[in-house]
Image (spheres, rainbow, N blue to C red):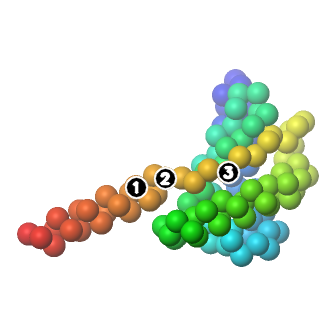
Amino acid sequence: MPNYRVGRVSQEIQREVNDILQKRVRDPRVQGITITDVEVTGDLQQATVYYSTLSEDEKTVSETQEGLNKAKGLVRKELGSRLTIHKTPELFFARDESVAYGNHIDELLNQLKNND
């Protein structure tokens, strides 16, 4: 049953990190992001938190990543007090490119439609 536990922990982390970023992190660089997925290693030692941003602007995207990296310690500490697991996983933030890719596909389809 370990896979069930990993799935449960990743869902819990996703919910809590979303909440922590909205309510506890005051950094304007991380406002308006959405946590889309969390992948936890089988030993629950590391968690990759995937997020999407409304902006596709390179500068904004890199500032958001910097803000998340800066907030990592606070988020992990807060997560530690909320989760009921022995050791809080080390967090890594990664941008979810699938949302941007989906938007790009939408734009291409609209262009095709408009050309007809």
Kindly tell me whether residue 10 is visible in this rendering.
no
Indicate left or right for 19 with 110 as reference.
right
User: Element at badge 2?
Assistant: helix
Towards the viewer: 13 or 8: 13
In which image quadrant can residue 59 be found?
bottom right
The single residue placed furthest to the top in the displayed view is 1
What separation in Å lies between label 3 and label 2 (alpha carbons)?
A: 12 Å
User: Element at badge 1?
Assistant: helix
Q: Position of residue 110 (x, y in %)?
A: 23, 68
**Three-letter code for the amino acid on which mark 2 is drawn:** Glu
Q: Position of residue 86 (x, y in %)?
A: 90, 36
> Which residue is the site of mark 2?
97
User: Element at badge 3?
Assistant: strand
**Three-letter code for the amino acid on which mark 3 is drawn:** Phe
Indicate left or right for 21 with 32 as reference.
right
The single residue placed furthest to the left in the displayed view is 116
Figure check: 25 above or below 75: below
Give me the residue at 71% from left, 41% from top. 47
Figure check: 22 above or below 43: below
Indicate left or right for 110 with 39 as reference.
left
Towards the viewer: 82 or 68: 68
- Which labelled disc corresponds to residue 93? 3
Figure check: 99 above or below 116: above
Q: Position of residue 103 (x, y in %)?
A: 38, 62
Give me the residue at 82% from left, 69% from top. 24
Q: Are the residues flagged by discs 1 and 2 in contact, CB closer than 8 Å? A: yes
Q: Are the residues flagged by discs 1 and 3 in contact, CB closer than 8 Å? A: no
What separation in Å lies between label 1 and label 3 (alpha carbons)?
A: 18 Å
> Which residue is the site of mark 1?
101
The quadrant of the picture occupied by the N terminus is: top right
- Mark 1 surroundings: few (<14), some (14-19) or many (≥20) residues within 10 A: few
